[in-house]
Amino acid sequence: MNIRHYCDQDKSGVIKLWLEDEPQPSSWNDPVQALRKKQEFQPGLLFVAEEGDEIVGTTMAGYDGHRGWIYSVVVSPLHRRKGIASSLLAYAEIELGKLGCAKVNLQVRDGNQGAVALYESLGYSVEPRVSMGKIIKAG
């Protein structure tokens, strides 16, 4: 298994993996659009895990100069429990650290206790926050 930066030839594998994880994504999480937008903004913060020619995991990061965020930690169900998510997160944290990022945040869907347990095992903790969102028309 190899962790590396995303490149254009990974597109179909990443989209396939994301759709496997969320077959009916919301309109703001459409894999094709999300990938296109990430390539337009901070493209160096999208990472893949590959095994042979297959993309088996991804994570995306963002940094606004104040704090970092982790998004789209996805590992193929056939490749889970092999340390891939942990390796992807460690890679993303190193890359964010190179940019001067001192704190990383992430969000977990309510009820996804497996993800919470994974992140806690990697040093993340639940912070007392209210997560809010609003869908806006993109320009």
Image: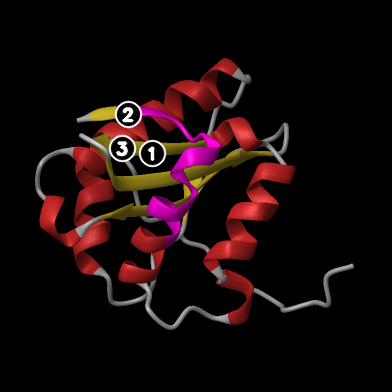
Please give the label number shown on residue 108: none
Say which residue label 2 marks.
3
Q: Nearer the viewer, residue 34 or 101?
A: 34
| Mark nearer the N terminus (1 vs 2) | 2
Q: What kind of element bears circle 1?
A: strand
- Whole-angstrom CA distance, mark 3 to mark 1, is 4 Å
Q: Identify the main secondary structure in magenta.
A: helix
Viewer-side residue, 137 vs 13:
13
**Percent position of residue 98, x then y:** 56, 16
The structure residue drawn at horizontal position 26% and vertical position 59%, both measured from the top left corner, is 115
Estimate the x, y position of residue 103 in percent, counting from the top left: 53, 34
Q: Identity of the amino acid at label 2?
A: Ile
* Residue drawn at (62%, 19%) of the image: 100
Is residue 21 inside the magenta stretch?
A: no
Q: Nearer the viewer, residue 24 or 137?
A: 24
What segment is highlighted magenta in the picture? 3-15
To which residue does mark 1 refer? Answer: 48
Distance between the Cα atoms at labels 3 and 2?
4 Å
Q: Tell me if 66 is positioned left or right of 71 in this view.
A: right
Q: Residue pushed farthest right?
A: 139
Contact check, label 1 and label 2, Cβ < 8 Å = yes
Q: Which residue is mark 3?
A: 49
C-alpha gap between disc 1 and disc 2: 6 Å
Q: Is residue 138 above or below residue 115?
A: below
- For badge 3, the amino acid type reads Ala
- Residue 12 is inside the magenta segment: yes
The residue depicted at 30 percent of the width and 47 percent of the height is 57
- Residue 70, position in %: x, y? 48, 46
The image shows residue 12 at horizontal and vertical percentages of 44, 54
Q: Tell me if residue 63 can be seen.
A: yes
* Residue 80 visible here: no
